[in-house]
Amino acid sequence: MGLTRFPHGVSSFGIPIFGEGLGILSLAAGNIYYLVTAKASTNPYYVKLDENGISDANIFTTLPTAYAATTTRQNDIIIVTPGTYTETESTAWAKDNVHLIGVGVGSPVSDWTLTQGMPVFTTATTDCANIVNITGERNSFQNVIFENYGNNAACLAAVLLNGYGNSFYKCAIQGIMTAGQIAEAACCSLDIAAGGHYPYLEDCIIGQCQWGTRTSTTQGHLRFSGAGSSGPSNGEFRNCKLLSHAETVGVPMVVTVAKYAWDRYWTFDNCIFYNFWTNWADKCNRVFYLHVMPGTSSMILQNCTAVGYDEWQTSDHGEVFATAMPIVGVGGGLARQPTAPVGT
């Protein structure tokens, strides 16, 4: 059998071979489905799929309908073409090993609904508390943007994570974008619930620093919302940016809501925590707002930087550990203007 064209696969006997960071899925891919913003002759992605012989039954225009076509535990893949997908209902992602892959390449930074070549899932309806509610296991989400900009306190998060071992690569996960969300403690960008064990996020953006000036001192863009006797454990954030816009001193970036909202270790490796304050008149006083800890939990900061904050934490009852960034201590990794001469 000769070479085949994308999207059937660029080389191997009909097996799809994907680009940047996606090759491993091609080794045992299940069924392939496609998302376009419209099934119309004016949509070049839809036209190209049709030219390449993709059945119209495998092409969808909303995330819930594409997800419904997949089968759990066979590495089915939803390929998302660039554009804005305005969702009116939350997708309850309960299946395992189902993957959502955007074909936009580059940084996941976006200008709200201006996609600039990336697939963007947005919502503005109170019927969509979360764009995706993930309870399934070992799914991956790559090269896509999730934005919850519903102007209501019921529009809680872009992503609610409540399943084991899910991964995110080059995704933007953004909430708290409107006046109706900025003061609501339960609103966030990424909500990790009790079942959200072992997530892996790499080259992702959590939150945003351009829309919605946050005011709640118990609200975080990254929220651990689990309750009970044991929280989610062993998560990793690598090369991620956590972004915020707050002009109230006590507003944190990361918040836990209860004693057992998180457990064991959570690693932040080479991450940036950034809060924008108009004209830099002041700073927020903490990155982490941690409730009383169970004594079994650690937030580990390795090669991280915080800009727009005075301290990593103020309560000092939690377990936040920092490696040399460049020093070990309360000032490690906290950005300052380099105005002092060498040696002072």
Image: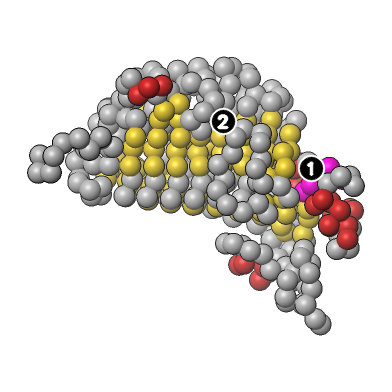
Q: From the image, tell me which residue sits under label 2.
A: 175
Quarter of the image for the C terminus: give it: top left
Q: Give residue 154's position: percent from left, percent from top.
A: 62, 21
What's the magenta bit mostly, secondary-structure-wise? loop
Pick the front one: 208 or 101: 208
**Disc nearer the start of the sequence (1/2):** 1
Q: Give residue 62's position: percent from left, percent from top.
A: 78, 41
Say few, some or many: other residues with alpha carbon within 10 Å of mark 2 (under 14 / 14 to 19 / 20 or more). Answer: many
Marker count (numbered)? 2
Is residue 37 rendered magenta in the image? Answer: yes
Q: Is residue 291 visible?
A: no
Q: Say which quarter of the image contains residue 245.
A: top left
Select label 1 or label 2 by which is in front.
1
Q: From the image, tell me which residue sits under label 1.
A: 37
Q: Is residue 253 visible?
A: yes
71 is higher (above) or lower (below) than 221: below
Pick the front one: 69 or 59: 59
Q: Which mark is residue 330?
A: none
Is residue 141 rendered magenta in the image? Answer: no
Q: Give residue 331's position: percent from left, percent from top.
A: 21, 37
The residue segment tinted magenta is 35-39
Left or right of 153: which side holds 289?
left
Does dot 1 land on a helix, a strand or a loop?
loop
Does dot 2 land on a helix, a strand or a loop?
loop
The type of residue carrying mark 1 is Thr
Q: Give residue 312's position: percent from left, percent from top.
A: 30, 34
Residue drawn where x is 40% and y is 30% of the image: 275
Left or right of 175: which side holds 198?
left
The type of residue carrying mark 2 is Gly
Say few, some or many: other residues with alpha carbon within 10 Å of mark 1 (under 14 / 14 to 19 / 20 or more). Answer: some
